[in-house]
Image (cartoon, helix red, strand yellow):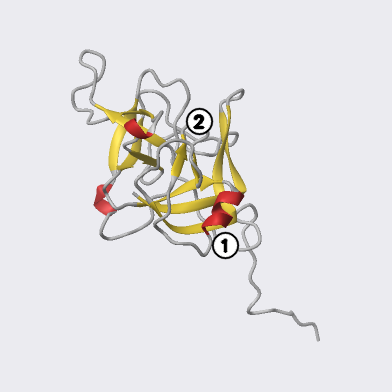
Amino acid sequence: MAGITVNPVQTTNALGSFSANSMGFVQGVLLDDPVTRFKLNQGIVGLAVTTPMWGGEGITESLITGGSEAAEIMSVLTLASSQANLTGFTVFNQATAMVQSAQSPVPLAAASMAIDFVRFGSGAHIVVACSNAVATAFLGGAINVALYWDYTNQVLLNAPGGTAIAAKVLDVNVGNSMIVSYNSGTGFATWTRTGSTAVIEI
């Protein structure tokens, strides 16, 4: 008599989700927290910004420019260039208006489009990209270590690359997280699924 063999405890991963296991983070995500869930803000990408923005980037926030931006807009966002003007980080949460496609699956916001963000001092826990070496250096270490932000590559550093930022590391993942890879030639942003990330509190 024919039978069917079934392994009731076998576990598989969806193709392209994560690599060896599902223990990882996604760059630019504001982690769920009942205390900080209402700290999410929305602004628009500044008109002078020349490349799209996505979650997990360090930003500077400014008021609208009279005559060129609508009065109801609360904040205009551009990429921060130094610790002096770093005011928060963009996130993907509730990013219903950002653009993505089969060729460019990472949600993107162009100039004048809406993008969500969280400010320093909010206590928000967000995921940012870092190198494998930086993530490994944080493993087993204290949370109150000096952190630095690379304003050119938009990644977290553990060695001076400028002035230390007011944040602390809560968790890290080495080599099994989704981080953004942007191609300036095509304008496409894709996911690197073997990246490293850190969860920071800002």
Tell me where residue 80 appears, x and y as whole percent.
39, 30
Tell me where residue 176 appears, x and y as whole percent.
60, 55
- Using residue 73 as the reference point, say whether residue 128 is left or right of it: right
Q: Amino acid at mark 1?
A: Ser
Kindly give the residue lying farthest to the top in the view shown: 67
Q: Is residue 74 visible?
A: yes
Tell me where residue 142 appears, x and y as whole percent.
44, 61
Q: Where's the N terminus, which quadrant? A: bottom right
Crowding near the residue tagged with mark 2, few <14, some 14–19, many ≥20 C-alpha atoms within 10 Å: few
Q: Residue at x 55, y 62 (%)?
A: 23
Circle 2 sits on which residue? 152
Quadrant in the rendering for residue 182: top right
Q: Is residue 169 above or below residue 9?
A: above
Label 2: element kind: loop
Q: How many labels, in total?
A: 2
Check contact, mark 1 vs mark 2: CB within 8 A.
Answer: no
Q: Nearer the viewer, residue 119 or 152?
A: 152
Q: Amino acid at mark 2?
A: Thr
Tell me where residue 19 appears, x and y as whole percent.
65, 57
Q: Is residue 180 above or below residue 5?
A: above
Query: Alpha carbon of mark 1 to alpha carbon of mark 2: how far?
Result: 30 Å
Circle 1 sits on which residue? 22
Tag in front: 1 or 2: 2
Q: Residue at x 46, y 28 (%)?
A: 52
Crowding near the residue tagged with mark 1, few <14, some 14–19, many ≥20 C-alpha atoms within 10 Å: few
Q: Earlier in the sequence, mark 1 or mark 2?
A: 1
Label 1: element kind: loop
Q: Residue at x 45, y 39 (%)?
A: 149
Task: Tell me, for residue 90, which label it has, or none.
Answer: none
